[in-house]
């Protein structure tokens, strides 16, 4: 399987081009993308739902990461699995509270869940990249990527004239 993937990548010129990019740039760019997507989804979700729902739902990150690690073969103690199940039940019950129905929306809640998935992906990928790239190089590229994507999103959403007046 791994050999097939390698031979496919060797035949694919885009994959070959990506492999020529320095590892610190690849890692930092990927992490910056995940963080940008998570932050964007989180901010949009928070604009549509209550702060309580947003805060609880974004904490799904802390449940997703060990769950995915367990699925990937990392040994997770049974007490952690139990805690994840209890926490998921609590999040579900909290988001079903009819008292907060007026200030929360399903769409906002879904964006906060999507943000938690992006943040969890960031955390999981950070485990990989953090082992092979010096922290300063990784964080510098991550921040630059996240910032650049944020400026592009600002220009796209507001137009150039409004964005220029923002600064």
Image: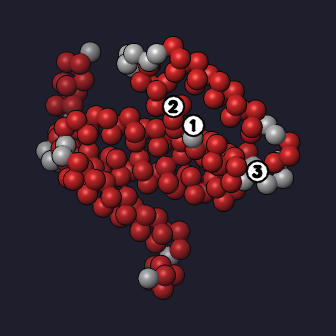
Q: Of helix, strand and loop, which one carries label 2?
A: helix
Q: Where's residue 37, x and y in %?
A: 47, 51
Q: Residues within 10 Å of mark 2 (few under 14, many from 20)?
A: some
Q: Which mark, residue 64?
A: 2
User: Farthest residue toward the front?
Assistant: 79
Q: Earlier in the sequence, mark 2 or mark 3?
A: 2
Q: Is residue 135 left or right of residue 116?
A: left
Q: Nearer the viewer, residue 79 or 59?
A: 79
Q: Of helix, strand and loop, which one carries label 1?
A: loop
Report if the CB atoms under discs 2 and 1 are less than 8 Å apart: yes
* Quarter residue 92 falls in: top right
Q: Which mark, residue 133?
A: none
Q: Residues within 10 Å of mark 3 (few under 14, many from 20)?
A: many
Q: Is residue 19 left or right of residue 59?
A: left
For the C terminus, the quadrant is bottom left
Q: Earlier in the sequence, mark 3 or mark 1?
A: 1
Q: Residue at x 49, y 81 (%)?
A: 166
Q: Nearer the viewer, residue 22 or 85?
A: 85
Whole-angstrom CA distance, mark 2 to mark 1, is 6 Å
Q: Residue at x 26, y 39 (%)?
A: 129
- Residue annotated with mark 1: 60
Whole-angstrom CA distance, mark 2 to mark 3, is 23 Å
Q: Residue at x 16, y 31 (%)?
A: 10
Report if the CB atoms under discs 3 and 1 are less than 8 Å apart: no
Q: Where's residue 149, x and y in %?
A: 39, 61
């Amino acid at each position: 399987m791994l050999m097939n993937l390698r031979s496919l990548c060797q035949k694919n010129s885009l994959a070959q081009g990506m492999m020529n990019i320095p590892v610190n740039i690849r890692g930092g760019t990927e992490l910056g993308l995940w963080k940008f997507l998570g932050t964007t989804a989180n901010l949009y979700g928070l604009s549509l739902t209550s702060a309580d729902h947003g805060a609880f739902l974004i904490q799904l990150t802390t449940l997703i990461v060990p769950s995915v690690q367990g699925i990937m073969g990392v040994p997770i103690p049974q007490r952690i699995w139990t805690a994840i199940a209890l926490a998921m039940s609590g999040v579900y019950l909290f988001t079903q509270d009819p008292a907060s129905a007026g200030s929360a929306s399903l769409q906002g809640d879904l964006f906060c869940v999507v943000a938690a998935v992006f943040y969890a992906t960031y955390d999981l990928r950070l485990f990989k990249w953090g082992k092979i790239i010096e922290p300063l190089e990784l964080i510098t590229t991550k921040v630059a990527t996240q910032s650049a994507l944020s400026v592009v999103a600002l220009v796209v959403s507001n137009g150039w004239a409004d964005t220029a007046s923002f600064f």
